[in-house]
Image (cartoon, rainbow, N blue to C red):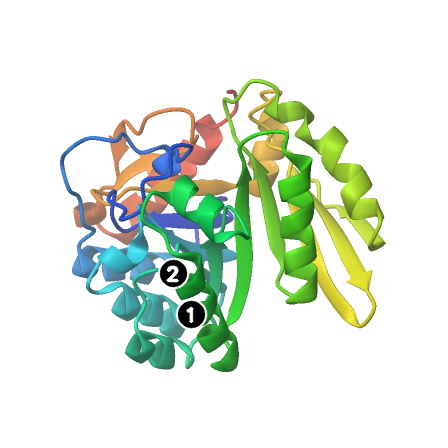
Amino acid sequence: MESINWDKFRILVTNRCNYKCQFCHNEGQGKTGHLDMMSVESFKQLINYLVGQKVSEINFSGGEPFLHKDIVEMIVYANDNMSCDISCATNLSLITDEQINRLAKTRVKFNIQFPFVTENEFAKSTGTGQLHSILDRITKIKSAGIAIGLNTVIQSPDYNAIEQMVKFALENELPLKLLPQIGLNGSNRFIDGILPILEKYTVKFVNKGTGALRWTLKNNNHQTSVLYIASPCFNKDIQTCRNYGEIRILPNFMLQCCILKGADERLCLEKGKNDVISQLGRLWNNFSHC
């Protein structure tokens, strides 16, 4: 079977979100007034085509994926038909108890947009988010046995806020991913101020070679991990980006190889599996420069 070479698929099920985060890049999608929702049947067709391919992860995202009325059905279908990791990037504000119970039967992991650990700053950053409500849902998800981690976009060199976030993640044993905001002046140097914070608690460090740096932290009886995404976009490091190997599938099935570039080619599902695999393989071969 022909190989597609892409290691990860980020499925953008909608372009709309109920939060109003000023820093949000909306996964590289244009912020237009037009609402897009991915077709469930077309999504299932894509998954059927990917069966047998060496894919390490399918990540559901948006916009906010839980604005899509069939998001649970889509996650379940990927879980039941693929052997790879399944994850979902969400702000967690819309998930219901019934959805939590259904997803507890899958291997999905939630990656939660979590900008601040104080109520006021959380509300100011998200526009509509309520920290206490999200903390309640985090507790329910952990109780259901679903894996969950925090994603924090670093918007400024406010290292006090970052240290608060690290302590919160450690005390609650929640994996934390720190993402310096792409396109923000000086964000490529945030790591210099964050390192001393992490080194206080570090017991292990790994450079994953994909732009991700991983620390294992421990304090008293609590342990967690922190992943810092040293984005290859900062240095236009195409090799590191290829090592990560992620392609975005927009709600209308336009294909986006780079978060900083628009999508200008549609996935031709109607042409059948062989043509789709060839199309993805060709895009990989052409993904050789920034």
Q: Is residue 58 left or right of residue 235?
A: left
Q: Residue at x 50, y 20 (%)?
A: 290
The residue tagged 2 is 92
Q: Which SS class for mark 2?
A: loop
Say which of 41 and 13 sits in front. Answer: 13
Can you say whether 188 is above or below 218 in the image? above
Residue reaching furthest to the front = 120
Residue 2 visible in the current orientation? no
Q: Residues within 10 Å of mark 2 (few under 14, many from 20)?
A: many
Can residue 173 be seen here? yes
> Residue 249, position in %: x, y?
32, 44
Q: In the figure, 22 relative to 107: above or below?
A: above
Mark carried by residue 83: none
Residue beneath the point at 77% across and 43% down:
197
Query: From this viewpoint, which residue is outermost toward the left?
Result: 34
What residue is rendered at 55% in x and 60% in y?
149
At mark 1, the secondary structure is: helix
> How far apart, in angstroms, are the residues tagged by discs 1 and 2?
7 Å
- Rendering coords of residue 215 (x, y %): 76, 51
Decide which of 16, 39 is in the foreground and name it: 16
The residue at the far top in this view is 185
Q: Is residue 265 above or below residue 12?
A: above
Q: Is 192 positioned to the left or the right of 285 in the image?
A: right
Q: Are marks 1 and 2 in contact (CB under 8 Å)?
A: yes
Amino acid under label 2? Answer: Leu
- At 18% from the left edge and 49% from the top edge, which residue is drawn? 37
Q: Position of residue 274 (x, y in %)?
A: 31, 49
The numbered mark, 1 or 2, whose residue comes first in the sequence reads 2
- Residue 267: image quadrant is top left
* Residue 146: % across, % down: 49, 74
Can you identify the residue that label 1 sits on? 137
